[in-house]
Image (cartoon, grey):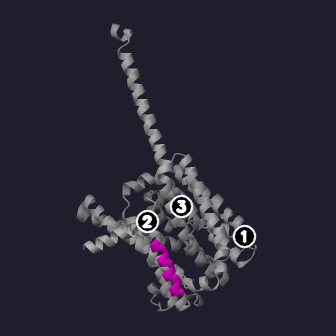
Amino acid sequence: MNGFRRLIGKLQNFKLLPVYVLFCMAVGIGLGKVYGISNFELTPPIDAMISIFQGTYTFSLPNSLALGIILGLFLMIYPAMANIKFEDLGRAVKSPKQLLVVLFFNFAVAPFWMLLLANLFLTPGSDFHTGLVLYGLAPCIAMVIVFTFLSLGNSALAIVLVAINSILQMILIPVYAKWLLGEVNFDVWVVAESVVLYLGIPLIAGVLTRRWGVKKYGEEGFTRIKAYLDALSIVGLLFTLIVMFALKGDLILARPGIILKLAIPMIIFFWSLFVVVYMVSWKLGFSYEDATAVAFNSTGRDFEIAIAIAITAFTPTVALATVVGPLIEVPVMLVLVWFARTTKSRLFMEKEKAVEVIGQFNTRERERTQYAARNSPSHKFR
């Protein structure tokens, strides 16, 4: 039991996370190389799940990898959902400034910023250009919750923002796709199915787990389970990295130029957008917890939907660009988690101390004024 607890502690050691991430990336690339996974046609994860319910699922490497993505994302998101209190969700709903910032950057800035970067670094009209623009269309509905969770941000606010993004993108993705890419034919229900699969199921499982745990152990007792849930989220992250890098492991080794071609604009996109939103949130006086939730929700892209649309509506090369996307995005976002946690003390602690000092000064001034009023000659005469 003590050995298991030590393992849990090591998994939660944020300083060791880069080592785990690099190791899992290497394992994934190795598996991809050994099995030549890039030679297989990727099954959309949603199609693999539907085939299970319809009883038509057949075991194959593409189907198994598709289910691996679903399982990994569930293990990542479910613990964050189980740690959320309903009262926290209620408070998060009443955050209009945070919501407006996210909506502005997600729908008025991000798609056009990605289009500009694609035009700068890739040939307009090429398959890679189309894949990159497609990748930038939809805000993330899953992994940003985990990145907020890892950065010790406001997970309740992240869930509320993700829910609103999910509703809006079902309406806006077809509009943006036609506007930026021309005539694109795809089933809009792919977006709705992704919302249910990657957000709805983990949310329901998390709520039921929390209700059961609090009823059985009480609020204080349930906090002891939190350590195991947090570790499960890290396991899900590492497992997802192995699966994603296995998808294109052999391609990474055989044609690294493809990765580099897409990596440069994507790294610029994620870093620039995150830092701008993070600093805007700081300037607007958001707490660190809210600033990280807003920044990750404005930066992360919905690779699940991008892959599904690319597979059903575009050429295999476009689909390749969307599959390579998360191989770049996830490591970059993990670096941004480190960036946020590192800058917390410099930006937000100083502001909190300044507010505290001003509060103490105002309190002393009020006390001094009241004392002077009580001891004034006019007060004594009365």
Q: Which residue is disc 1 drawn over?
A: 121
Q: Nearer the viewer, residue 242 or 172?
A: 242
Locate residue 163, reporting x and y percent: 50, 63
Marks 1,3: beta carbons within 8 A: no
Counting labels gives: 3
Q: Is 169 part of what is drawn in magenta?
A: no
User: In terms of secondary structure, where does tag 3 sit?
Assistant: helix
Is the residue 316 above or below the residue 304 in the image? below
Indicate the secondary structure of the residue bearing disc 2.
helix
If you read the primary sequence from the N terminus, does the residue marked by circle 2 or circle 3 appear first? 2
Q: Residue 358 location in percent, x, y?
A: 46, 35
Q: Which of marks 2 and 3 is in front?
A: 2
What's under tag 3, amino acid-wise?
A: Asn
Which stretch did the figure color magenta? 19-32
Residue 200 is drawn in which quadrant? Answer: bottom left
Q: Which residue position is annotated with label 3? A: 297
User: From what the image shows, is residue 36 above or below residue 193?
Assistant: below
State the mark number for residue 15. 2
Question: Which amino acid type corresponds to the residue marked 2 in the rendered image?
Answer: Lys
Relative to 301, 64 lies left or right? left
Callout 1 crowding tier (Cα within 10 Å): few <14, some 14–19, many ≥20: few
Write the residue at 50% across / 90% down.
61
Q: Which residue is drawn at 44% across and 69% down?
A: 17
Name the quadrant of the C terminus: top left
Would you identify the image quadrant in which residue 299 lies?
A: bottom right
Q: Residues under labels 2 and 1: Cα distance? A: 34 Å
